[in-house]
Structure formats: C-alpha cells, structure tokens
Amino acid sequence: MYKAFLFDLDGTLADTAPDLHSALNYTLSHVHLEPVSLSLTRHWVGHGARVMIAQALKDLGEEEALGDRIDELHGHFLDYYRKNIAVMSVPFGDVEDLLKQLAIRELPMGVVTNKFYHLSLELLRALDFYKYFDVLVGGDTLQVQKPAAEPALYACNELSVEPNSVLFVGDSITDVGCARAAGCDVAIVRNGYNQGRDPESLGADRIFDSFLELLDQTPT
C-alpha cells in the first residue's frame, strides 16, 4: 500500500501533444521549414522543448544547418506555447477520477515533470488539476532533470514520505529511470508518450490501461 503518488505530466496526466505540436510547427515555420507530423511529436515529448526541436531538425535534415540556433528557436517555441498552453490539451481518460479518490483517501500527491515549472503550473491550473497536488517539480526546479533521481527525491522530501513507499506514475523510460534511481516503484500507462518504445520493455513494476486500476494499491 503506497503512502504517496508522484505523477509525470505530459502523456500521463494529460494529452498535451497537440498543443506542443502546434508550438513546434510554429517554431519551424520561423526558419521556413515544413511542419512535422503529430505522431512524430508524440515520440519526442518527454525530454524538454529543446530536445524536441533538435529531433525535428534532425528529422527534416536540418540539424547541421540550424543546430546552433536551438536557443533562438526555443524562445519562439516558449513564447507561442505559453500563450496556447491548453487550447487542445485534455486530461487522459479517468485520471481525474483517480486524483479525486486519492484526495478523498488523503494521500499526498506530486507532479514531477521535465516541463518548465511555470509552464507546468499554468497547465495544471488550466486543467483545474493543481488543487490535487502538494508539490510540483519542474524541469528547472533543480539543476538536473529526470531520469536523474533528484526530482523524485526532492518531491518525496517535500511530501515527508520515504521513496520506497511511493508509486511513481508515468509513461516513458525517463520516468522509469527516475523512479528506479530514487527507489520508488513505478507504474506506466500503456497509451502514454513512450517515445516509440513498447511499454512492456520499459522495466516498470506495473503497466496499466485505466488509472482506476491503481486504487488497489491504496488504503481504503
């Protein structure tokens, strides 16, 4: 029985790829490049916007020509995304039902994401999810990001729980790596942003389809 839950954000709590995709293609248009597909964007989410932009440039064969302009492109991306952060982003399935039940059971919850803190805060507020969480660790909260252990350990410390009593809920190898390094158990949602990898190959303790399946791991 877990005493607390940590959640990834993009691809776990919400389907944010459509808004990220829109921001990415807006950014590419600044350097007169063709748009990339939504399916590719879904594979690239999880390591931060700079990596996503770099992946798009590589896919378009422009990595060498434009690689030194990542900071400039990142600025365009952030400006657009901040203004359009929840136009098409929606919570996944029954995730809010799980959050409500965990809140009723008074289990502390946190978000650990590689998305910048201020963007994560804006998104959670737009989705009306922020009220459920006791701690938010963004990609710029610490000097390191997932898959390093520190973001999860920081969240555990803020929640006053031992890592081995926490379930980390995510969707990718980045989340598995962070949870494992911190000493947390980890559950992976099958239809999240798994960066093109088979969920069964990620090494999670559990793979689930419905978020409500996780309630069997909590005190009633």
Image: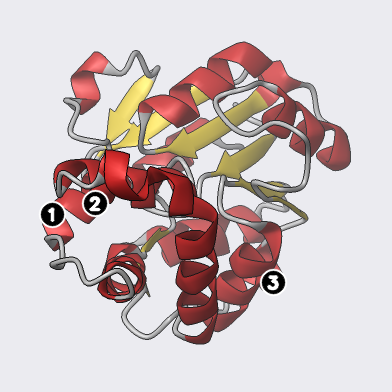
Say if 115 sits above or below 82 in the image: above
Q: What residue type is labelled 3?
A: Lys
Q: Can residue 46 be seen at all in this image of the molecule?
A: yes
* Residue 58, percent from left and from top: 23, 41
Q: Look at the numbered disc 2 and give the secondary structure of its residue.
A: helix
Q: Which of these two is toward me, 116 or 218? A: 116
Q: In this view, does 14 lie to the left or right of 120?
A: left
The residue to which callout 2 is attached is 42
- Residue 183 visible? The answer is no
Which quadrant of the figure has residue 63?
A: top left
Amino acid carrying label 2: it is Arg
Name the residue nearer the viewer: 33 or 188. Answer: 33
* Camera-side mark, 3 or 2: 2
Q: Are marks 2 and 1 in contact (CB under 8 Å)?
A: yes
Q: Given the image, on which type of amino acid does mark 1 rest?
A: Ser
Cα distance in 3D space between marks 2 and 1? 5 Å
Residue 169: x %, y % from top left: 48, 38
Between 8 and 101, the residue placed more toward the observer is 8
Task: Please give the name of the residue rendered at 70% of the width and 33% of the height, measured from the top-left corner.
Answer: 151
